[in-house]
Image: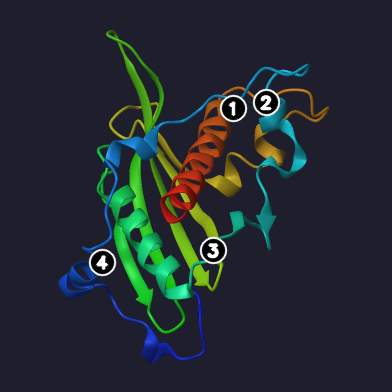
Amino acid sequence: MPMLCSAQSEWEAPTSANNTENASVEKKAAGKESKIKEASPSETKDWKYIQDNAVPEVEGKVVFSYDKECPGKSAQQIYDLAYAALDSIAHSDNQISSSIALINRKEHVIVSRNTEWLEFNKNFLSLDRTKFSYTIIARCADNHISITLGRISYNYEEDRPTGFRTTAEKWITNKYAVNKKRTKLTAGAAKFRKKTIDRKDAIFEYIYKYINR
């Protein structure tokens, strides 16, 4: 776990008391956050997903970042609402093993570790999906929220001979998921890159709307 602040003693695992403190914050229906909007068509197919900055890397690690102003709200107010939003995500139907893992109430920081089902395709004959693991870190300040989503990994078809485990760094980065001409996504990795980008967009938007509703 990276050092998120200088004073280690300020970090704690959330308890039922923490949940009670945040119970007064109304939670939306958990399933709403999982809805993903598809990108609108453009002149280049999958343009949204092909761009160099579509999957950003920080010191060799895939880290998606989101910074937004939240006018008129204190750091504590944003922290309480962000906590409720992250807890709602952790208890939605698509989750496998997810929870708020660490909090720093003094610095207004929340760490959530999630493993969920990420669906590629579903119909009455088949279901194509992967276990998708990631860590969200929300840092709250007066009038501002900063969120990162990183430590991404996939566990695909673990009970089949075709199954595999991999990380975002070795699967959805430009090196592996986009052809050399930067004109299209590569087979195999394409669906992982597209759905990961869509999912992080949905998560960031859900948290922001929850805070500013």
Give the mark nearer the N terminus: 4 vs 1.
Answer: 4
Residue hosting label 1? 190
Residue 45 drawn at (x, y percent): 71, 18
Q: Which residue is mark 2?
A: 185
Q: Is residue 94 above or below residue 207?
A: above
Q: Residue at x 30, y 56 (%)?
A: 87
Instruction: Residue type at mark 4: give it.
Output: Asn
Between discs 4 and 3, the one toward the N terminus = 4
Q: Amino acid at mark 1?
A: Ala
The quadrant of the rendering that contains the N terminus is bottom left
Q: Earlier in the sequence, mark 2 or mark 1?
A: 2
Q: Which of the two residues, 3 or 166, is positioned nearer the viewer here?
A: 3
Q: Is residue 54 left or right of residue 105?
A: right
Identify the residue at the far front of this view: 72
Check disc 3 and report its element: helix, strand or loop.
strand
Which residue carries the number 4 mark? 22
Q: Which residue is mark 3?
A: 145
